[in-house]
Image: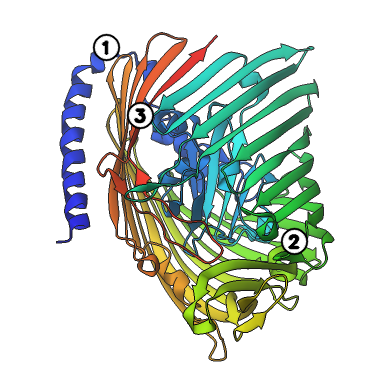
Amino acid sequence: MTMSGKRFRCGIQALIALSGMLMFGGCLAADEHPMDDLIGLSLEELSNLEVSIVSKRPERLADSAAAVSVLTAEEIRRSGYTSIAELLRLVPGMDVVRVDTGEWAISSRGFNSRFANKLLVMVDGRSVYTSLFSGTFWENLDVVLEDIERIEVIRGPGASTWGANAVNGVINIITRHAGDTEGGLVSAYHGGVQRGLALRYGAPFGDSGFFRVYGKYNARDGFLEQEDFRDDDRHHGGRVGFRADWEPSASDALMLQGEVFDEDPNDPWLGGGHLLFNWENRRDDGAVGNLQMYLDRFDLQTGEVDDDAVNEVLDTLDVEYRHLFAPMGGHELIAGVSYRFQRSVIEQHAFTQSDPAERHSSRFSAFFQDEIALLQDRWYLTIGSKLEYNDYTGFEAQPTLRSRWNPDDHSTLWAAVSRAVRVPSRAEHDLFVEDDLSAGSPMFGGLPVKFAARPDDSFDSEELIAYELGYRWRSSDTFMLDLAMFYNDYDQLRTLEIGNPMLVLEPSPRILVSGQAGNMMQGQTYGFELSTEWRPHPKWRLRANYSLLKMNLDAHPDSLDPTAEDPAGQSPEQQLSLRAMVDIAPDWELDLFLRYVDRLPYFEVDAYTELDARLGWHVNQSLSLALVGRNLLNETHWEYGREPLGSTPHLIEREVFVRLEWRF
């Protein structure tokens, strides 16, 4: 057995032993707990939890015909985590990799990288991905965690509802109504690696309004790049913002929120802000209209010297209206239209140029979805599609067909067939950027060798046809099982077509190896995600997640990309996690999270097993303290490797810190 396998087995044994002791302790203390202090939502309440990520209308989590997971506010609090990226480790099937102290690579169902581009991420329905590379800067997604109501996650396509780039998954972070955050909050953490502070105050205004204002600061020290070298990848940043909710009438609800931020993870620097407005109108017949619009500015500055910099200012205007029609017989129909305008300006440098330097782009879209009751309370069929027009590839249709069957009140069998596309990004169409391959090559007389990513306006959308099958089952209020299986058929996947080396003299002599984006690969991925939860006692909660991913990618015979099939080795084939949440005394909580992540063959990164732990103490109704430890089984471990144009990976270190939460 390998060393990583031995650590995995030892970790499992340790968790089982701890679980047994904690269950015994929890049973001894059970009589001291009032029944209204049970641990989080019951399994029945969790099944009845309403989510809107599948169809933009509320539906029971248990009835969702998709691989949906929800992280509740209680789960977020008890995790002890300090960022959205870390929280996603708790979702089955999510591939979450820490690159360095501030940067992450996150995906669902394969194709993970620092610049992963098949996962749509939103906050309150506002897209936070950048059109520069169709991905997310996770170091900038620094929401005040205490203000999150829940995080909804789809593993698999959601394009028929949310549109292009919702290919392998969708994440929507939903923040709390301002009326649920009255009073003051001080939340702080401090340890050997990181520290942070969040301040919030909320109050009512007028006859039916509420508001909150907040500010947040965080700082993280650099990780080790090698065993004996710590480079400067420190991260610090902050943001201030507000949210207001009010109801001018019994049928209308308005929301306005805004934020400005400044995040400096050494490279890149990120800044900007947004303003979002939402109006919901509910009618007596059950129809609901919703208008949402937002303005967003995102400022990116990267590169250690000016000539290598990629500096972009991106302005976005997004307007969407959707309407949930009153029930019509056995039909529940929702439809909507949206428009997005973006202005992107990229600063020109010697080794980074864009043609054009300023691009204006528009996206028009419409969607509809109809849930048809074929057999009331038992069998439902959902048909829908997103129809979009974009400036890169023109018209795109992304239909879906979903069906669910409820053989009884405690189980759901569902199936789905969907089409999704990932449209080209600005970098693929417009951007020329160089990156060092070698400081000096003897083969070329000591000249430096650089790689140049060149634009290609013929690059087309990547396509996916996804087939999914799932089953959910809940046995009374002690055990729950959720299984999702998938088979994804991809076409026109991106390759990097390499050209012949050439000598370039201006602005300095160098050997240039160029590459352009091409659609020269296809392939299939398949696997499953299994999540179970067992509650043998009201104060004891144990959850286990397992996921299996297989990837078969084939480049076209004419492709000149020597690394075309490498993405198959950049995502773990297997992942396993166990989470225990225990109330060990009236005012004490213990939370354990053990995870096993399979090796990454492409990067030659070994499999690893790690344990995170949290010990929480409710000092009184206003003050809570927690001791949090992360990566406790190993002093350091690798999670990722070096990729072209990506960041230098760092050793992930063990850390311990203290958290404080004071409400007044």
Tell which circle, 3 or 1, labels the residue nearer the N-terminal end: 1
Snapshot quadrant of residue 132 = bottom right
- Whole-percent x and y of residue 472? 41, 50
- Amino acid type shown at disc 3: Val
Looking at the image, which is closer to me, 534 or 377? 534
Instruction: Write down the quadrant of residue 429 in the picture.
Output: bottom right
Q: What amino acid is labelled 1 in the image?
A: Glu
Q: Position of residue 660 (x, y in %)?
A: 44, 19
Q: Name the residue under label 1.
A: 32
The residue shown at (51%, 27%) is 196
Label 2 and label 1: CA atoms lie apart by 67 Å
Give the left or right position of residue 422, taking residue 647 as reference: right
Q: Which of marks 3 and 1 is in front?
A: 3
Report which residue position mark 2 lands on.
Answer: 349
Q: In this view, does 639 lie above or below 584?
A: below
Category of crowding for the residue at label 1, using alpha-carbon neighbours closer than 10 angstroms: few (below 14), some (14–19), many (at least 20): few
Question: What amino acid type should be assigned to the residue bearing mark 2?
Answer: His
Task: Nearest to the eye among marks 2 and 1: give it.
Answer: 2
Q: Name the residue under label 3.
A: 628
Residue 392 screen position, x and y as percent: 77, 69
